[in-house]
Image (cartoon, rainbow, N blue to C red):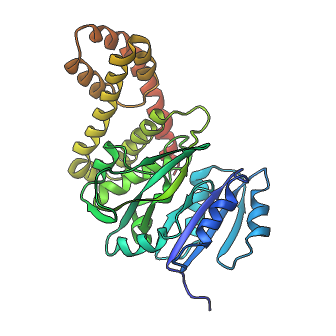
Amino acid sequence: MKPQPNISIVIPLYNKEKYLARTLESVLSQSYQDFEVIIINDGSTDQGASIAAEKFPSSKIRLINQENTGVSSARNNGALHSSGELIIFLDADDYWDSSFLEIMVEGIGQHNWAMCAESHQKGESVTLRGFDNVKSGMFNVSDFFTLFLNNQTGCPGTIVMKRKFYNKYGGFLIGLKNGEDVEMWLRLAVNDSKIQYCSDKLVHYSYAIPEGATMSNRCEDSLISFWIAMEKNHPTSMKNKCNKPFLMCFNHFANRAYRFYTRSGYRKTANYLANSDHYVPTTINSLVSKSPFFIEKVVFTLLRLITLRISLVKKNITGLINKQ
């Protein structure tokens, strides 16, 4: 009988033939080797699945084909077919330093989850993302929401979590077009906001925003879907744990809207607010309290448009959640 691996690495695959070999090479070259790789081919139309099967005939890798149902479905399916005590979701175009698994397995210890910093790669350009001016290595962060508000959370491949923790509170929301990973991180954080954090940039994220999305609406779609899901499934948690940090998150986006206004004037602020899927009261109050009187005219001019958009977004996401 084949021994159960300590770590399950789930890789959703959809048309990533250009990057997949680099990703798998980074996994197979890890200094820590007690793992399995579950690749879920989500109906790819390129040669990605063939590359995995023919160029990487490792006993550690399993390739599972499914019809194209989206990245959330692929990740959830991979989790169902995996068996490790720890689980990681690595995108097919991202890759790790060779010490990633070793450092994260040691660092997670008795905690439910751990995260590390990352670099962003867009073409030939590379930028670093993570805490500055801190010592190298692993340390404890008592509030995940602090990471989120300071833009220090990373791509799925930066997070290692205990399977029991994922099984109880995790799972990616099927049908959410943007920010499905952030939605799940926030849901996990409501139940355990303490997380181990490694400041070393061990993960390299290939920066590509899905068609029709921006970084702003990715995060804000995640926030609304998280809020609705928690109201539906965990009303007690919402009252006891979630309100303060979550309202801080909304205030963060309101502040961003105000910065757009001060830098770029009416038009950019109007576009931002019209395309933002967070709640009106927090946005309105933050903008009005911090701004000169002219911005009040902007806010109230946009109020009807914003309210209409938010009601439509909430209706759509509520429908998705009710289907889960």
In the rendered view, tell whether residue 227 sits above or below residue 164. Answer: above
From the top left corner, tell me how far across and down residue 77 is, in percent. Answer: 60, 62
Q: How many numbered marks, from 0 up?
A: 0
In the rendered view, tell whether residue 256 sits above or below residue 264. Answer: below
Query: Residue at left 42%, top 74%?
Result: 105
Could you say which is closer to the camera, residue 316 or residue 305? 305
User: Left of 243 or right of it: where is 28?
Assistant: right
From the top left corner, tell me how far across and down residue 256 is, in percent. Answer: 34, 28
From the top left corner, tell me how far across and down residue 324 is, in percent. Answer: 51, 52
Report whether residue 171 is seen: no
Determine which quarter of the picture holds residue 49.
bottom right
Query: Residue at left 49%, top 44%?
Result: 179
From the top left corner, tell me how far across and down residue 146 is, in percent. Answer: 28, 48
Could you say which is closer to the camera, residue 287 or residue 246? 287
In the rendered view, tell whether residue 42 sits above or below residue 308. Answer: below
Q: In what quadrant of the picture does the N terminus appear?
A: bottom right
Query: Residue at left 50%, top 54%?
Result: 172
Determine which quarter of the picture holds residue 40.
bottom right
Determine which quarter of the picture holds residue 28.
bottom right
Could you say which is closer to the camera, residue 125 or residue 59? 125
Report whether residue 267 is seen: yes
